[in-house]
Amino acid sequence: MENKALNLPQISQEEKLIAKSIEKSLGKRPKFFIHRDEPTDPVYVAIGRVGDSPSHQLTALATNGISNYPLFASDGSGYPDTRLELVGACETDQADEFEQMIFFSGRTIIKQKWFCAPGTFLSNAVSRFGKFGDMQHLYFTTPFGFDGFSTESFGARKVSWLSPVPVSSAEVQFARENSTEKLEEAFEENDVDWFDLKRASIF
């Protein structure tokens, strides 16, 4: 996967507006990097980084480019309500790996037309990038720990934000047997550190 400084000659007006919104929400101008499967692949996802955000020793990462493409519902039909971008954070020394996980999520949404919505899981999106103890998959939820990442219109494009967080296989199984609402309640009861890619599973 290619990872280089953002230097594209044709950035859409929507992307410019999204970049400004990310900067305003995070309180600092992010440094954007372009990710592609191959250097000549026309499909790309820009990911912006901001250090010490949303707090000290954390790094925030936000996408800009997934919403260039339609979001598809689970039945394969176009999802007309909104398009999607991702925002999350992790411990600073885990940011390189988390950035790859976010790109993998974005390219799966775009290329595989995967319907990413609150309460969905992306299998092996953590473990494919290294050994992270109990954490193996990504869970997508409404952004927390950030201000300003709500559904918003950028030009003619309506964009919603989701946050990917690491989860274990046991936590995924618990959600399937109970509900994602019960899983999030269990996270709160156990004071889970969402930002640690190597945290212990609560089950």
Image (cartoon, helix red, strand yellow):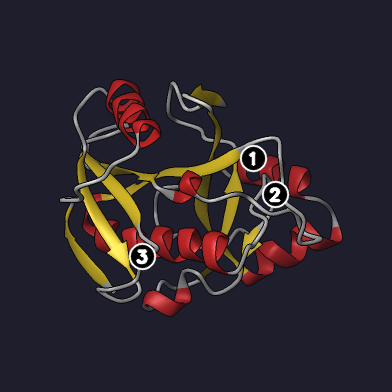
Q: Is residue 198 visible?
A: no
Disc 3 designates what residue? 42
Q: What label sits on residue 37 in the rendered view?
A: none
Which quadrant does the C terminus fall into? bottom right
**Mark 1 is on which residue type?**
Glu
Q: What label sits on residue 119 in the rendered view?
A: 2
User: In the shown orientation, is residue 36 left or right of residue 8?
Assistant: right
Residue sitting at x 64%, y 62%: 114
| Callout 2–callout 1 Cβ contact below 8 Å | no
State the residue in front, 116 or 78: 78
Quarter residue 22 falls in: top left
Q: Depth-wise, is mark 2 or mark 3 nearer the camera?
A: 3
Q: Earlier in the sequence, mark 2 or mark 1?
A: 2
Q: Earlier in the sequence, mark 1 or mark 3?
A: 3
Q: Secondary structure at mark 1?
A: helix
Residue sitting at x 63%, y 50%: 71
